[in-house]
Amino acid sequence: MNRRTFLTRSLGGSLALLAAGSLAGCGFHLRGRDQVAMRLDRLTLAGPAAPLTDAVRQTLRRSGVDTVDDAPWRLNLGTERLVETPLTTNDAGSRDIELRLSVPFSVQRVQDDAYLLERQDLEVSSIYQTNASDLLVRGDRREAAIKDLRREAASRLLDRLQSLDPSS
């Protein structure tokens, strides 16, 4: 192989790797990725009437899981806990605040209450910035961060449910 062919192939391969790496880092998702094959195609969702329960229900429906009352398996959601931790200590200017959302969950067979997945805690966290002098924006940013955390928690819960085998 001569030098020109080698350089051409090397450059082509490098550009392909660079393109793949930049697509992976920019949030690019393949079409239909949310439509994953679930082994649990029907679930009863038992949890408090809360925004997180609604987010989980929507995520399950988008992935093709029916949330019905007569399903053979029950997803038990506990009450979400939100913890705010200031990361900066200055009184003026911009402040970083960490939000942590955690929720207990389990999966049970409805017939005999046997656990397919025993109680676990799911935890997600995020950092948002506020300005001490602008209280309205601070509240809006906090609410947006909480909403994003609920979506992230629902997505991670779906990831955990995908690995379950209800036939065992």
Image (cartoon, rainbow, N blue to C red):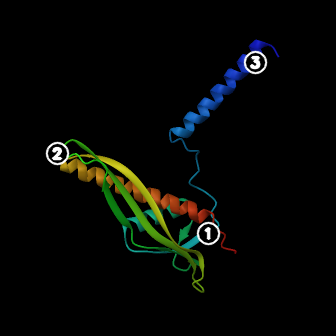
Residue 99 visible somewhere in the drawing: yes
Question: Going 38% across and 59% down the picture, which residue do you hit?
Answer: 100
Number of the label disc, if any, that sits on residue 40: 1
Q: CA distance from mark 2 to mark 3?
A: 60 Å
Q: Is residue 127 shown above or below 71?
A: above
Q: Is residue 139 left or right of residue 161?
A: left
Residue 72 visible somewhere in the drawing: no
Q: Amino acid at mark 1?
A: Leu
Label 3 sits on residue: 6
Q: CA distance from mark 1 to mark 3?
A: 50 Å
SS assignment at label 2: loop
Q: Is residue 134 shown above or below 63?
A: above
Question: Going 82% across and 17% down the picture, which residue do you hit?
Answer: 1
Q: Is residue 53 shown above or below 27?
A: below
**What is the crowding at mark 1: few (fewer than 14 residues within 10 Å), some, or many (at least 20)?**
some
Please provide percent x and percent y for residue 143: 30, 55
Q: Amino acid at mark 3?
A: Phe
Q: Is residue 149 left or right of residue 118?
A: left
Marks 2 and 3, the one that precedes in the sequence: 3
Marks 2 and 1, the one that precedes in the sequence: 1
Label 2 sits on residue: 133
Q: CA distance from mark 2 to mark 1?
A: 49 Å
Question: Going 65% across and 29% down the picture, which residue do you hit?
Answer: 16
Q: Amino acid at mark 2?
A: Ser
Please provide percent x and percent y for residue 161: 58, 65
Marks 1 and 3, the one that precedes in the sequence: 3
Please provide percent x and percent y for residue 132: 19, 47
